[in-house]
Image (cartoon, helix red, strand yellow):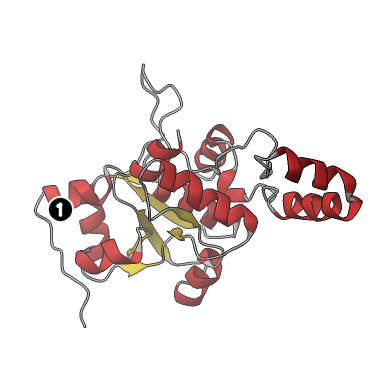
Amino acid sequence: MLASAALNPSCSFSRPRWPSDSIRFHSSTPAAAASFGSHPRSASRSFRVRSAATKPAKSPAEEDWKIKREVLLQKRVRSVDVKEALRLQKENNFVILDVRPEAEFKEAHPPGAINVQIYRLIKEWTAWDIARRAAFAFFGIFAGTEENPEFMQSVESKLDKDAKIIVACSTGGTMKPSQSLPEGQQSRSLIAAYLLVLNGYKNVFHLEGGLYNWFKEGLPAEPEKE
């Protein structure tokens, strides 16, 4: 599941779940095991390490997709296709908020788009983050991501609460039910839209089909200017 979440932007983004939400360190030698058992202070040190590796409390971005979807529907967040998004951008002063990683944004993005990445490369070095890096590396993924804790702060510094926003990511996801996906499928842009409406943004749209469709349709795009 972890590999899937890291490779597929449309997947649900959640932290990998360990059997006890902690890291266990076991000695491989009887002598070391005996030494461990004879020193209570060693046991205390082990307990502190395990506590440091405990998974942090769930953030709003990690809320169940079913709940996110209900909120998005209640707040009347509407999905628009790429051509409608371009029209809204040109004629109605909508801003495209590109929540892809910064490196992807720099390669190509719609002109005038603003980038605030909702997920970033893992930066911290707590025991939990080290464990997550190891889990990604196990699947051959050496650029594991984590939720960007400064996402809303960055958005608020660039867009006021009355701004007309179209949130975009790579694939878009969907709120529309289907036979195979009765609750649609979440994506980075839908998670971002959820966070925006939770924080008081009133004019939030979602880019159906994502920027993959934007580029596929040959709509205007440009690289980041140096």
Left or right: residue 22 versus residue 134 is: right
Is residue 9 visible from the viewing direction of this image? no
Q: Residue furthest front?
A: 31
Q: Residue at x 65, y 33 (%)?
A: 19
Q: What percent of the width, then of the height, locates residue 26?
A: 68, 41
Give the residue pinned by disc 1. Answer: 215
- What amino acid is at disc 1? Phe
Image quadrant in which the N terminus is located: top left
Secondary structure, mark 1, is: helix
Task: Reply above or below: 80 against 90.
Answer: above
Left or right: residue 57 versus residue 85 is: right
Q: Residue furthest top?
A: 179
Q: Residue at x 44, y 46 (%)?
A: 136
Quarter of the image holding residue 150?
bottom right
Left or right: residue 116 versus residue 222 is: right
Q: Residue furthest left?
A: 218
